[in-house]
Image (cartoon, rainbow, N blue to C red):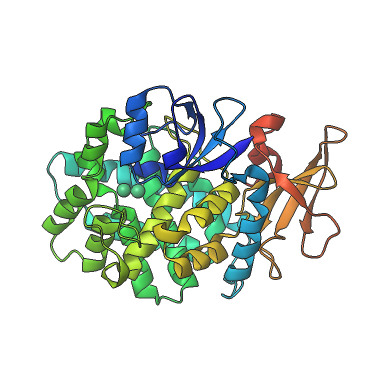
Amino acid sequence: MRKKININELKTGMYIDELCGSWMDHPFWKATFKLEDPNDLVSLHHSSIKEVWIDTVKGLDVGPQVPHLVEEDTGSNTYQSLEHAATVAPKIQLGVSLEQELARAEQIRNEGRHAIMSMFAEVRMGKALPMDEMVGLVDKINDSVMRNHSALLSLVKLKNKDDYTYLHSVAVCALMIALGKQLGVEENQLKLLGMAGLLHDVGKIAMPEDILNKPGRLTDDEFELIKTHPVRGWEILKESPSMNALVQDVCLHHHERVDGTGYPDQLSGPALTLAARMGGICDVYDAITSDRCYKAGWPPAEAIRKMAEWQNGHFDATIFQAFVRTIGIYPVGTLLKLKSGRLAVVTDQSEKSLLKPVVKVFFSTRSNTRIKMELVDLSHAQDTIENIEHADKWGLDVKKITGVV
Ligand SMILES: [Fe+2]
Ligand SMILES: [Fe+2]
């Protein structure tokens, strides 16, 4: 059984199933492990982690004196409160359908990956940031997001360890623009937000690649070094003539948190700008939904749920609600099992409820066969969502079958 316990109750012999908090802000890159080394316990006490989930089947349990949250208590409640909060904002009107945008978005994704890769290489050799090229790229990403933001966002999810940093930049650019649009930001500012997303991790140029791509856990020293990338990036951006202050701000402050526990400046409250708060949300969402060399990405719907659970302290609640409204509680591309036993992939959000998206059904888990594909708007259907599924479990190439990534 999974139990949520306070960090002070943790002892060696327990099996950590999940560290509550952003996994990017502590030195434990493994999400689950048996706590055997007392030094690990000390490191955890020194980290920003306040609570952990333990698995009492795989390791020691806590005493019975204090009641603890068990697995069954989470999940649906989070989704319900998210739904309530997120419906305050209007749904973004899309220019074209997902199918219509996917091919163009794929081209922009590939162009973007190539452009960021070359930019990193040039700056690493001491050349200036190729800003004309970056401006052109932001324009294209902005146009695609305006037509249908789900197309590019679902495509940039797919990364491998070699192109993670490049596609992460494209993804955060697209997310910043989509979120800015949801928040009612005007077009010129939207492009600035996009540029900030595109360049937010430029400081990784100055990080040793073997540490950036290290498959295992980072040492404390390595983690401290990685934490310097916002400042290193800001130094690079300052060199570029007339670099906008907003872009510099997001680069320097995308790892800050609203409660002041982030880095490098521990900013909180009004000191943290809207753009920096947006950057923090977009950055974490893309990082945790991407496959990395040390862990598989979470399905987007799961990432949204986790972020909702972390949001007190980590993220600005109002901006997070707008973010959820932008990409949905079940973002496009989420694989779902319906109560009818059918597998379906999310293709759009419905006007009525973020908990009832539009899906494409394509497989019956009861007969274990493909079925005729059809679009079902769950807000008007009898069928409901049973749970989120992993495509690997069913051995299905969802993209090939449905055309939806
Ligand atoms: Fe970063
Ligand atoms: Fe990032």
Q: Is residue 354 left or right of residue 219?
A: right
Q: Please report the residue visible at 72 percent of the width from the left and 60 percent of the height from the top.
A: 356
Q: Please report the residue visible at 46 percent of the width from the left and 58 percent of the height from the top.
A: 311
Q: Is residue 326 left or right of residue 330?
A: left
Would you place residue 122 above or below residue 60 in this image? Answer: below
Quadrant location, the C terminus: top right
Q: Please report the residue visible at 34 percent of the width from the left and 61 percent of the height from the top.
A: 259
Q: Considering depth in this image, is 215 or 396 the residue closer to the camera? A: 215
The quarter holding residue 315 reads: bottom left
Would you place residue 237 above or below residue 86 in this image? Answer: above
Q: How many marks?
A: 0
Q: Where is residue 123 shown, x and y percent of the image?
A: 18, 44
Q: Residue furthest top?
A: 36
Q: Where is residue 354 shown, x and y percent of the image?
A: 66, 63
Asked if residue 106 shows in the view, the reply is yes
The quarter holding residue 89 reads: bottom right
Quadrant location, the N terminus: top right
Asked if residue 208 shows in the view, the reply is no
The quarter holding residue 343 reads: top right
Would you place residue 4 above or below residue 369 in this image? Answer: below
Q: Please report the residue visible at 64 percent of the width from the left and 51 percent of the height from the top.
A: 75
Q: Where is residue 124 shown, x and y percent of the image?
A: 18, 40
Q: Where is residue 12 shown, x and y percent of the image?
A: 44, 26
Q: Considering depth in this image, is 139 or 322 the residue closer to the camera? A: 322
